[in-house]
Image (cartoon, helix red, strand yellow):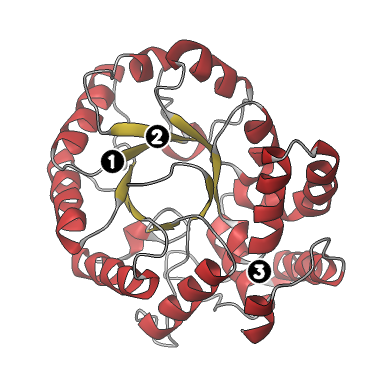
Amino acid sequence: MIDWAGVFPAVTSQFDEQLKLDFESIERMVNQLVDEGVHGIIALGTVGENNSLSFEEKRDVLRSIKNAVDGRVPVLTGVSELTTDAAKKFAQDAQEIGLDGLMVLPAMVYVPSDEELDWHFRQVAGATDLPVMIYNNPAAYRITIPVETLAGWSDVPNVVALKESAEDSRRFTDIINACGDRYAVFAGLDDLALEGLVLGARGWVSGLTNAFPQESIAIYEAVLNGDLERAREIYRWFLPLLHLDAQPNLVQCIKLAEEVMGRGSERVRPPRLVLSGEERKRVIDMVEKAAATRPVEVSAATKAA
């Protein structure tokens, strides 16, 4: 059973110098995040470069991460495929591998009607017994899941959570007003995380947590404990970096932040290319400044790494 609350980093997929999957680095990175206190792991989201991996590579990543986590926290996978049938097959494979849940995206490339969107999610959810987090990200996937559609899924019992990445924070309240406690709503944009948590989100699916996990957890815990002054303090320190999660090149930015912090490699698969020039310098400067002014004491797990 998943306790649908807390900070769930959407982890990166690590590559070696030949851009082959580096499973040793993936497992080391995931182990460190769990040791530092994250509440769950999400593999193969946007930051995990899902659509840059082959079918077999995706399954190998899931096995590697499941092995590294070893039941300490729940592990979910992104389900991001071109067709509904491919998404159903991947969801079934994830269940067979032993994952704890799914984060299901609309079918890639094709922009569906509301009817097609509803049908796709119902089909994928119905293909397994795993609990499903629906992923709404209109900026990335060119479609917004209507609140009315979310409210109409009472007959799909394993759809239990929502990653909400719309750029309008009013969606959190609209969803809760329409659906009550039907869904565990998670903030999905890093630079709207505090707003989402304050407005009732139970958790945060985060990219920059890969580089700064303790600050992410501290924001969540401060909100949980009603200490909004502390939450605002950390969030204001963090926000320049959190804006990187809303850029088209968020994957490169987050992986560069990981490398600067000694937590992973910036290598990405084409068509993505590592950052260069002024953009690269800007991100490095931001990360180094943040590292020098961290508002949270670094844990023993971080020091050991």
Q: Quadrant of residue 188?
A: top right
Query: Which mark is first along the chain, 3 or 1?
Result: 1
> Which element is circle 2 on?
strand
Query: Which mark is first along the chain, 1 or 2?
Result: 1
Residues marked 2 and 1 touching at CB (< 8 Å): yes
Mark pair 2, 1: CA separation: 8 Å
Disc number at residue 139? none
Residues 189 and 184: in front is 184
Residue placed at 51% from the left, 67% from the top? Answer: 34
> Which element is circle 1 on?
loop
What residue does disc 3 label?
257
Of badges 2 and 3, nearer the viewer stands 2
Residues 256 and 64: in front is 64
Relative placement, left or right, of 204 versus 42 is right
Q: Quadrant of residue 121?
A: top left
Residues marked 2 and 3 touching at CB (< 8 Å): no
Disc number at residue 161? 2
The x and y percentages for residue 22 are 39, 82
Relative placement, left or right, of 187 versus 143 is right
Residues marked 1 and 3 touching at CB (< 8 Å): no
Mark pair 1, 3: CA separation: 31 Å
Would you call the spot at circle 1 few (<14 residues within 10 Å), some (14-19), or many (20 or more)?
Answer: some
Residue placed at 44% from the left, 53% from the top? Answer: 46
The x and y percentages for residue 129 are 17, 42
Would you call the spot at circle 3 few (<14 residues within 10 Å), some (14-19), or many (20 or more)?
Answer: many
What amino acid is found at the position of numbered circle 1 in the picture?
A: Pro
What residue does disc 1 label?
131
The x and y percentages for residue 75 are 36, 58
Count numbered badges in the picture.
3
> Which element is circle 3 on?
helix
Residue placed at 54% from the left, 71% from the top? Answer: 35
Q: Quadrant of residue 303?
A: bottom right
